[in-house]
Image (cartoon, rainbow, N blue to C red):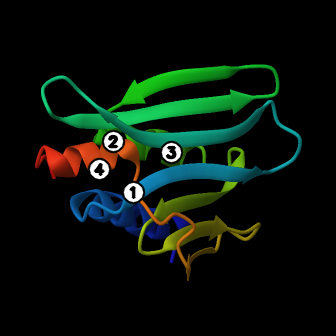
Amino acid sequence: MSYQTVFEEFFEQVKSSIKEGTFAKLTMAKTIGDTDLKNIFVRLHLLENNEYNFAFTFRYKTEEVEQFHSVEQTFLILSSYIKNPFTNALLFTTEKDLIFKVNKKNAASLTEQAPTFKHASDVMLEMIEKKIV
């Protein structure tokens, strides 16, 4: 199975965690080599029309850049960074941590671990309160 297919499955879990109200955050980590871009942090962002998108924080060696993207754009952007330069994506929810990894042979895996966060993100809790999800 190609890593793209496994990443699609990973991103379906991201969307599912939002629908279920358990999303805490998402992080891209573990770069290939020494790169200027060190991490990408993704969190929910509530819009004025009671819809949501994602707030990206691109952490570089010398600066941080914030951008906002739709759900569809988020999938395309994150998938473009797999193996260029990131090998891991981590989804943190209140039910589990889901880790996407791709190795040098382009084989991908999904691993579940106990949850790191006990509470969903503040934006997720606000969305639940407003019954957006």
Q: Is residue 76 above or below residue 112?
A: above
Give amino acid for label 4: Leu
Instruction: Give the residue type that dot 3 points to.
Output: Leu
Label 4 belongs to which residue? 125
Q: Is residue 72 left or right of residue 81?
A: left
Q: Nearer the viewer, residue 33 or 128?
A: 128
Q: Identify the residue at image location x=73%, y=71%.
A: 105
Q: Earlier in the sequence, mark 4 or mark 3?
A: 3
| Quadrant housing residue 101 | bottom right
Marks 2 and 4 close (CB-CB < 8 Å): yes
- Disc 1 vs disc 3: which is toward the camera? 1
The x and y percentages for residue 3 are 55, 67
The tag earlier along the polypeptide, 1 or 3, is 3
Place of residue 99 in the rendered image (x, y in percent of width and height, measured from the top left): 58, 69
The local secondary structure at tag 1 comes to: loop
Q: Residues within 10 Å of mark 2 (few under 14, many from 20)?
A: some
Tell me which residue sits at (41%, 74%) in the image: 95
Residue 123's tag is 2
Q: Are marks 1 and 4 in contact (CB under 8 Å)?
A: yes
Q: Are marks 2 and 1 in contact (CB under 8 Å)?
A: no
> How far apart are the alpha carbons under marks 1 and 3?
21 Å
Could you tell me the amino acid type at mark 2?
A: Val
For this view, does 11 lie left or right of residue 30? left
Name the secondary structure under disc 2: helix
**In the image shown, does 95 or 75 lie closer to the viewer?**
95
| First in residue order: circle 1 vs circle 4 | 1
Q: Is residue 22 above or below residue 51?
A: below
Label 1 sits on residue: 120
- How far apart marks 2 and 4 lie (CA) works out to 5 Å
- Inspect the image, locate mark 1, and give the three-letter code of the amino acid beneath it: Ala
Q: Earlier in the sequence, mark 3 or mark 2?
A: 3
The residue tagged 3 is 78
